[in-house]
Amino acid sequence: MGEYLDKGLHEECGVFGVYRQSDAAHLTYFGLHALQHRGQEGAGIAVADGKTVRCRKGKGLLSDVFGRNDLDGMTGKNAIGHVRYGTAGGGEVENVQPIVSRLANGGALAVAHNGQIANAAELRKELEDKGSIFWGSSDSEIILHLLQGTKGPLIEKIKQACNRLDGAFAFLILTEKNLYAVRDKNGLRPLSLAKQGDGWCVSSESCAFDIVGAHLVRDVRPGEIVKISAAGLESCFYTEETSCNLCAMEYIYFSRPDSVLERQNVHGVRRECGRLLAQEDLDNFFKADIVVGVPDSSLSAAAGYSEAIGLPNEMGLIKNRYVGRTFIQPTQAQRDLGVRLKLSANVPVVRGKRVVLVDDSIVRGTTSKRIVALLRQAGATEVHLRIAAPAIKYPCFYGVDMSTRAELASASLEPDVLAKVLGADSLRFLSVDDLKQACGCQGLCTACFDGSYVTPLYSNKI
Ligand code: SF4
């Protein structure tokens, strides 16, 4: 994550679209800018002017792909964009989105997809056997080929295609005249709608609406297909079997604190997670001097923990905001250097103190271990690690690039043992029930914590 520490947790992408806005390409650029934390491997924008769909995309950050004048020629009032972190398919440019194609009837369309199609391998083989030719290896291209292979108006094609897809997806389709927004029937990946004047915006996260002056209206519902055209907004569902199971990691880690998902502000949820996490320590008369949150994604939880337990919330870790991704390299020594470049301990604050270190997750444990060591080297006398989320024990099949089970520290180690491995004096996690209470929404995917997958599981993948 650009904005967060690299823990081995990565979201697969962010999407943004605008309908009936002058300067649609520029607005999409700004919307994607607010979503850059969701993916930094590639970015692209497709614009429609009523007659054709034009696209520009490339590898890297948005600012790498679009120079000062690159958007000037992209005229049109409707646009979609994408920022990519690829879990399925490689990092080659063919996999960068939006992907543009032409339907059999001649109409051009572009697709931007967030999520992971669990039955991608089976569908790809079936489509290739029938003669489909794929340009890249991304599972998102499957959506286009499924649309090509179905009959009827586009809305019917989308319904038929969605009913073939298993897994997590939220995608946008831009045609020459219309914009479609689709969310999977389990509501795993987020997608929100906003109004701006006469026009509409769609985004993976509502934080992107604020930057373009749009106002959040609602989430796209699980299983819903929203069509935005000159006639206005129309809604239908591709199935009646829907339920909301938004990825809990969106609240815990991925989304920006100022986003609102399923009517819950992300900062508010994190703060509540911290507050509930403190409860057991309160009950056990736990003693410490200060609370320190790991910047940036754990600061809200640290604030909640500190308030509830009555200890000062101190800035014991400082993040260097100007470290480029290029400094994070694959070898262990380079990764160690990467953490030191990104984070420093505030020595006068932590020296001689018993520190409660609040973080949002432990994946492999390597980052947590380095941060605990950083605090000890700075003179902390005790470091008690508190994770404002349950222990991650199972892999994700829904678009989050999580380690295999063997690499997940909590899959095999109980908290007491893991605390020793990480060099911490104690370690506690939030319970799944407390997480659900903090999120306050009706449905939540918690599969990576408790193994309760919401779609048929491919057991050979565990
Ligand atoms: S398994 Fe975990 S990371 Fe994957 S969608 Fe569910 S909550 Fe999110």
Image: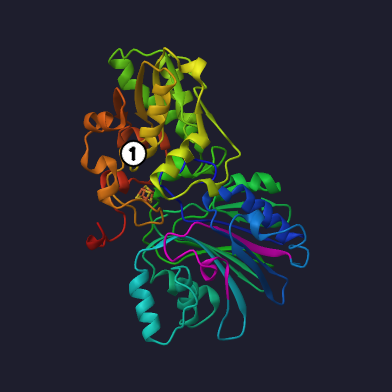
Q: Nearer the viewer, residue 300 or 156?
A: 300
Relative image position of residue 72 (x, y in whole percent): 78, 63
Q: What residue is shown at x 68% (from left), y 45% (from top)?
A: 211
Categorize mark 1 by other alpha carbons within 10 Å: few (<14), some (14-19), many (20+): some
Q: Residue at x 54, y 79 (%)?
A: 153
On the question of residue 177 being in view, the answer is no
Above or below residue 353? Residue 190 is below
Q: Is residue 206 above or below residue 343?
A: below
User: How far across and how far down the image is residue 430, in percent?
Assistant: 33, 32
Secondary structure of the residue carrying tag 1 is loop
Q: Is residue 55 left or right of residue 422?
A: right
Q: Is residue 159 left or right of residue 56?
A: left
Residue 189 seen from this side: yes
> Residue 228: x, y in percent?
62, 64
Q: How is the image coloured?
A: rainbow
Between 117 and 365, which is closer to the camera in this rendering?
365
Q: Is residue 98 magenta?
A: yes
Disc 1 CB within 8 Å of nearest ligand 1 atom: no
Q: Is residue 181 magenta?
A: no
Work out whether 452 lies above or below 172. Answer: above
Give the magenta-colored segment's residue range: 77-100
Amino acid type at mark 1? Gly
Number of callouts in the render? 1
Q: Report which residue position mark 1 lands on.
A: 365
Residue shown at 29% from the left, 24% from the top:
426
**In the image, 212: left or right of 82?**
right
Residue appearing at x 70%, y 49% in the figure: 212
Most distant residue in the front direction: 333
Residue 28 image offset from top left, x and y in percent: 67, 57
Q: Quadrant of the C terminus?
A: bottom left
Q: Nearer the viewer, residue 288 or 325?
A: 325
